[in-house]
Amino acid sequence: MIKEQEAGLSTAEVCRKHGLSPATFYKLKARYGGLEVSDARRLRQLEYENGKLKRLLAESFWTTRS
């Protein structure tokens, strides 16, 4: 999506095409703007794994305190 906008499509057109609000588009652009597609995928995977580990840690903390 970011590459489409950088190639000349208007932001409104890109958002309409992908079903996003402009605010969401700019949020994604701020996060993934300078990354290649493979790097962005890897970042999302690492963020998912990090969240999973945080939930496991929180669960183990609360089960040991009960």
Image: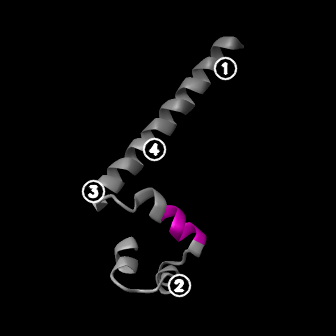
Drawn side of residue 25 relative to residue 38, left or right = right
Residue count near mark 2 (Cα–Cα under 10 Å), binned few <14, some 14–19, many ≥20: few
- Residue type at mark 4 is Tyr
Dot placed on the residue nearer the N-terminal end, 4 or 1: 4
- Residue type at mark 3 is Ser
- Residue type at mark 2 is Ala
Residue at 60% over, 26% down: 58
Of discs 3 and 4, which sits in the foreground? 3
Dot placed on the residue nearer the N-terminal end, 1 or 2: 2
Badge number at residue 29: none
Of discs 1 and 2, which sits in the foreground? 2
Label 3 – label 4 distance at C-alpha: 15 Å
Of discs 4 and 2, which sits in the foreground? 2
Q: Which of 65 and 16 is in front in this view?
A: 16
Label 2 – label 3 distance at C-alpha: 26 Å
Q: Mark 4 points at which residue?
A: 48
Q: Nearer the viewer, residue 37 or 5?
A: 5
Which color scheme is applied?
one colour
Image position, residue 34 (x, y; %): 35, 60
Of discs 2 and 3, which sits in the foreground? 2
Badge number at residue 62: 1
Q: Is mark 3 on a helix, strand or loop?
A: helix
Residue count near mark 1 (Cα–Cα under 10 Å), binned few <14, some 14–19, many ≥20: few
Per the rendered image, the range of residues in magenta is: 23-28
Q: Name the residue under label 3.
A: 38
Label 4 – label 1 distance at C-alpha: 21 Å
Drawn side of residue 65 relative to residue 17, left or right = right
- Which residue sits furthest top? 65
Q: Mark 2 points at which residue?
A: 12
